[in-house]
Amino acid sequence: MKIDSIQNGIVLDHITAGKAMQIYYDLGLDKLDCSIAIMQNVKSDKMGKKDIIKIDKNMDVNLDVIGYIDPSVTVSIIKDGVTTEKKKVALPKKLINIKKCKNPRCITAIEPDIPQIFKLTDENRRVYRCIYCDAD
């Protein structure tokens, strides 16, 4: 299979196999009007298998969304066919309007305009807790 290189855009690489579609939808890539290539279960020497997403458009991507789903992702910015910048994504310390609180008694369930904010409380287990009610 051959996927052409992109001239101007973004490549999300080193995605854990099986997580590309979640990143695709959570970043809102399904709403873009440009070419997007999603490769799943690509052979990788380091990871065994990985997913890759190529976006044929320069845009701002929410690194917190990517880091929450898969902190092993590498984001490459491509300009004129050359990688001009590479960013390593990390597990975000705080999530704002990325995750919703499951607690029906939380203030965010009653007041829809309040932002959904979660703080990372356990980095090893990747546990986030609501700052309002402490639910995970």
Image (cartoon, helix red, strand yellow):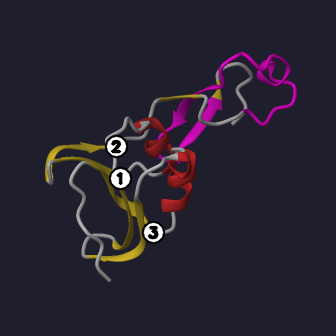
Q: Earlier in the sequence, mark 1 or mark 2?
A: 1
Q: Mark 1–mark 2 contact, CB under 8 Å? A: yes
For mark 1, does the 10 Å Cα neighbourhood hold few (<14), some (14 to 19), or many (20 or more) residues? many
The picture quadrant where one finds residue 106 is: top right
Quarter of the image with the N terminus is bottom left
Tell me the amino acid under the disc marked 2. Answer: Val
**Residue at x 70%, y 26% (from the top left corner):** 134
Q: Residue furthest bottom?
A: 1
Residue 17 badge = 3
> Is 6 or 42 nearer to us in this picture?
6
| Side (left or right) of 53 relative to 97 | left
> Is 30 or 87 nearer to us in this picture?
30
Q: Please provide percent x and percent y for residue 97.
A: 61, 29
The picture quadrant where one finds residue 135 is: top right
Residue 89 badge = 2
The residues bearing labels 1 and 3 have C-alpha atoms spaced at a distance of: 11 Å
- Secondary structure beneath disc 3? loop
> Is 93 or 12 nearer to us in this picture?
12
Q: What range of the chain is rendered magenta?
A: 101-129
- Secondary structure beneath disc 1? loop
Count every numbered label the image shows and give the total.
Answer: 3
Q: Mark 1–mark 3 contact, CB under 8 Å? A: no
**Circle 1 residue:** 73
| Side (left or right) of 70 relative to 56 | right
The residues bearing labels 1 and 2 have C-alpha atoms spaced at a distance of: 6 Å
| Side (left or right) of 121 relative to 53 | right
